[in-house]
């Protein structure tokens, strides 16, 4: 799974970072920054939780098979 | 409350039963009109509020976001400023309120919380509002802002006379607002003669809009907003969460034994019992919402507190579910006006609850008539573990049913360009380490 944050939508609620800091960091103004674009399998459910908790709907999760698809049976 | 909502209000005793009012209005009158405060429309459904907050070009804050106003003569900054100027005013404080900076405050917040609790250690019944919920944010915010301790009493009084006095004695709110602005003008003169510091006041003294420093009035108008927002909202949130916990021993005990749940619980308390129930806008042009025609110049109250209990978005929307997983609540507002201090506010609430629960795990209401809202007294009685069993379920609310996945909602309108943001690597997750 791939995730991205729309910088035009993110308002710095910081919810994603609190839920899964391995995937979402924040910059010095408090806006979200993706640190792991390709989300490892063990973080997928928490990353999806971040998607659902973002009140700005700023995070997109792409469920298309990513480059490393197939590595995890 | 009539189903048409013509007498709808969201202050004082109207808050006693506001959650059932919301439920009724969402079902029968999702977009309604009240005659109070000069007349205003109100939105009760999550999606309507969401779309309005994302559309500042039509839903303007120029005429003020607070309804009624605090008695301020000029726009509060940055609350009553529309984009694109808004971002310039916000940017001067965004770094100070960013997560990494707030995290550094955590030991201080814990220390203050702990010493406040020491202060009523010998008391069987203590006022968790006056002795704790109101004082913790007062000290933390004043420290962060660079406001002197000697003026704490004035700050408390001004918050009361503006935030609460505005509905009962608007003329006095105006007088208090003038006093607040005079105080901050004087503070500015004093601080300009002192070496620069990097507290919030210092950030405002050096911050620039369109390349220039803030005027004396702008400085005062910004500080006024910070003062009421910094003191009242966190205090209310801590108090209302304790009001809930005093009546729900199961939730209390779960949070004591599983302090890692505190992050989710904090969001849930904010969803259900938040201090800001509604924020106003003024229409820049005619719009139609759910078949209602609203005219340019009309005031619209976005009922964040009702959106937060919308059955179409939240399962069991009227229940406090401390480990709720999907919770995209609107307590801090959304869009360009997202509460600037939200990271500070939720940290104060979480630490305030954590520390109190670790020191005083068992308590109940000593007065079962106190309202859930406001900054009034919250007398709590300590009890033994078994004794508090009887305290439970005093305010069980009916559950709602439906929900839809938050992630499946359609996108909403555009918003204005955000300022350039540079990425920075600092921070680390703050585990909700219990102090049990």
Image (cartoon, helix red, strand yellow):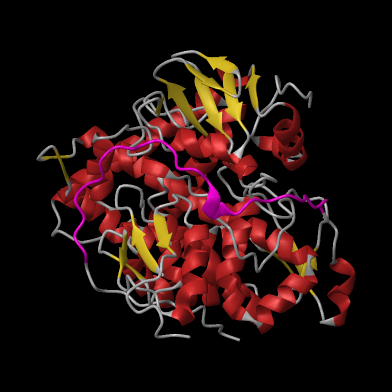
What secondary structure is the magenta-colored segment mainly? loop
Task: Assess whether residue B112 is covered by the magenta stretch.
Answer: no
Q: Which residues are magenta?
A: B397-423
Give the vertical position of B225 relative to B320 (above or below): above
Work out whether residue B361 can be spotted: no
Give the vertical position of B254 relative to B213 (above or below): below
Return the residue nearer the eye: B260 or B196.
B260
Give the vertical position of B65 relative to B158 (above or below): above
Residue at position x 61%, y 65% from top? B325
Residue B279: % across, % down: 51, 35
Residue B15: % across, % down: 70, 39
Is B220 placed left or right of A53 in the picture?
Answer: left
Residue at position x 22%, y 42% from top? B88
Residue at position x 25%, y 41% from top? B417
Figure quadrant of the C terminus of chain B: bottom right
Tell me where residue A28 sits by quadrant. Answer: bottom left
Is A6 placed left or right of B125 in the picture?
Answer: left
């Amino acid at each position: 799974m791939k995730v991205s944050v729309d910088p035009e939508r993110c308002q710095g609620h910081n919810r994603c970072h609190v839920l899964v800091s391995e995937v979402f960091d924040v910059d010095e103004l408090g806006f979200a920054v993706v640190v792991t674009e390709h989300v490892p399998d063990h973080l997928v459910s928490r990353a999806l939780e971040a998607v659902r908790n973002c009140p700005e709907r700023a995070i997109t999760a792409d469920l298309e098979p990513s480059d490393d698809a197939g590595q995890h049976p | 409350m009539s189903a048409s909502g013509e007498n709808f209000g969201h202050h004082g005793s109207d808050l006693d039963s506001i959650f059932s009012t919301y439920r009724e209005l969402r079902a029968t009158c999702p977009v309604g009109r009240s005659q109070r405060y000069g007349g205003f429309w109100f939105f009760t459904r999550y999606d309507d509020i969401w779309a309005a907050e994302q559309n500042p070009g039509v839903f303007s804050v120029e005429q003020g976001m607070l309804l009624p106003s605090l008695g301020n003569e000029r726009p509060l900054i940055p609350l009553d400023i529309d984009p694109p100027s808004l971002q310039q005013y916000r940017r001067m404080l965004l770094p100070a309120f960013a997560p990494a900076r707030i995290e550094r405050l955590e030991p201080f917040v814990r220390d203050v919380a702990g010493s406040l609790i020491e202060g009523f250690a010998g008391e069987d019944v203590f006022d968790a509002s006056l002795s704790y919920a109101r004082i913790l944010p007062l000290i933390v915010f004043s420290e962060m802002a660079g406001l002197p301790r000697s003026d704490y009493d004035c700050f408390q009084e001004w918050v009361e006379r503006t935030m609460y006095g505005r509905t009962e004695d608007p003329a006095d709110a105006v007088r208090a607002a003038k006093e607040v602005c005079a105080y901050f003008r004087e503070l500015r003169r004093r601080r300009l003669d002192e070496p620069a510091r990097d507290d919030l006041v210092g950030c405002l003294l050096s911050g620039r809009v369109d390349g220039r420093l803030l005027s004396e009035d702008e400085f005062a108008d910004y500080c006024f907003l910070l003062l009421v927002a910094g003191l009242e909202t966190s205090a209310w949130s801590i108090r209302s969460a304790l009001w809930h916990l005093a009546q729900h021993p199961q939730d209390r005990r779960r949070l004591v034994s599983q302090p890692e749940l505190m992050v989710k619980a904090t969001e849930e308390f904010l969803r259900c019992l938040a201090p800001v129930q509604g924020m106003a806008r003024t229409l820049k042009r005619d719009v139609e919402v759910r078949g209602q025609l609203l005219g340019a110049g009309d005031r619209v109250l976005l009922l964040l507190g009702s959106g937060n209990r919308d059955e179409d978005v939240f399962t069991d929307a009227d229940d406090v579910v401390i480990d709720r997983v999907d919770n995209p609540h609107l307590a801090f507002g959304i869009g360009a006006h997202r509460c600037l201090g939200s990271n500070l506010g939720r940290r104060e609430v979480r630490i305030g609850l954590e520390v109190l629960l670790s020191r005083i795990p068992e308590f109940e209401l000593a007065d079962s008539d106190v309202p859930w809202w406001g900054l009034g007294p919250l007398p709590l009685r300590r009890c033994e573990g078994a004794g508090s069993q009887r305290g439970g379920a005093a305010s069980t609310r009916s559950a709602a049913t439906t929900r839809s996945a938050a992630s499946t909602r359609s996108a909403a309108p555009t918003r204005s360009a955000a300022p350039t943001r540079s990425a920075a690597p600092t921070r680390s997750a703050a585990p909700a380490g219990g102090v049990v």
